[in-house]
Amino acid sequence: LDAEASALKPGCGWLPSDWMPTEALRRAFRALARAEDAVLSDYGATRGSLALRRILMARFADEGLEVPPEQLLLTTSGTQAIDLICRFLLRPGDTVLVDDPCYFNFRALLRAHQVKLVSVPYTPAGPDVASFEAVVAAERPRLYITVAGLHNPTGATMSPQTAHRVLNAAAAYDLAIVEDDIFADFEPEPSARLAALDGLNRVIRIGSFSKTLSASLRCGYIAARADWIDDLVDLQVATGFGGPSAAATEIIASVLASGFYRKHVEELRRRLTRVRRDVGEKLQRVGIEPWLMPRGGFQLWCRLPDGCDSADVARAALSDNVVLAPGNVFSASQTASAFMRFNVAQCRDPRLMPALQRAIGR
């Protein structure tokens, strides 16, 4: 986040600004200037903009998930959504299950909540089911946190068979699940979703708009059981006096409601399909092998050449002003030192591959 503008950032988790719908955002900002005074000056409603929640409800309905307005809460970000859920469901010393590897900030946030962290290996079809069932039975975690659709950092997609077995284990041991759906719009077609299969009984769906729309307009959401949402509303008021600003949600709703957004996402998918293939081939030529080629999105989880430690490679690359994402940052068991996550949209600069070759000693 604090890297110089001139730095190459193939390890970051966002698209370049010139890939984002900035012109549509500028139009929405101009329209916001004509909004009612209350939108520009007042606190927002405790559950957030009804217009934006209705847009989300329609999107959920397309995948077979019926979510009434009282089961949907807007938050100031996707990270804050998880923080609220952790405050609500967890107490220090509770056990939480994560994937290995998993999104690095899950680990940082859970450390802040002083919980015990256990992990399960992630496979191309989702969490290793036998390991998942064994860990849940032995450790009795209170919560499982995962990324749906296009897993972070691996880019893998959970299979329907894995999803059903995960839900069966969760039901048997009273396990709540947080399903982070932040990469949903990058999928070429929808995959199995725990929230849709479960009907928001023990699964909580969260997400945000930072990956396809804007990371500057901070806004996330939580879809969950109505009684849980009631308590989360009170908790969000207590800790932040409400959710995202009315101005931010007005802009997001305006862009999402336009026909432009659908075209923007379709173009992102096409562009990323080309870039994933191209970057994957370039990485292979310097000895870096993609673990799999994802169905969509911008992440490649890659194995480094034998004998390379990704933390050492990342430190070496800093001398070329290149910011990388070493594997153990994502691994609770610290078993991913041979891996590294690459953002293909941030790998287009011709200086990158020579810098990687120097960093891995080739």
Image (spheres, rainbow, N blue to C red):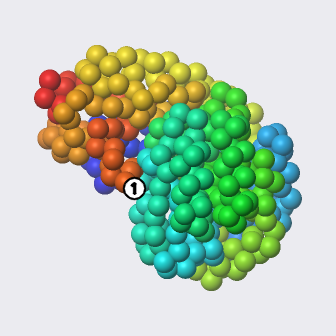
Side (left or right) of 164 relative to 81: right
Relative image position of residue 263 (x, y in whole percent)? 68, 28
* Residue at 81% over, 54% down: 199
Residue 124 location, x and y as percent?
53, 33
Residue 18 seen in render: no
Q: Is residue 281 above or below residue 211?
A: above
Residue at coordinates 72% horizontally, 45% vertically from top-left?
164
Q: Secondary structure at mark 1?
A: loop
Q: Position of residue 321 (x, y in %)?
A: 20, 40
Residue 335, image x, y percentages: 33, 47
Horizontal arrangement in the rendering, residue 357 relative to residue 163 (left or right): left
262 or 22: nearer the eye?
A: 262
User: Which residue position holds label 1?
Assistant: 332
Q: Name the foreground residue: 139 vs 323.
A: 139
Amino acid under disc 1: Ala
Q: Is residue 168 above or below residue 317?
A: below
- Quadrant assignment, res 88: bottom right
Check the picture and name the quadrant holding the C terminus. Answer: top left
Residue found at the very far bottom of the displayed protein: 238
Residue at x 20%, y 35% (from the top left corner): 308
Q: Residue at x 42, y 29 (%)?
A: 291
Residue 170 visible from this viewpoint: yes
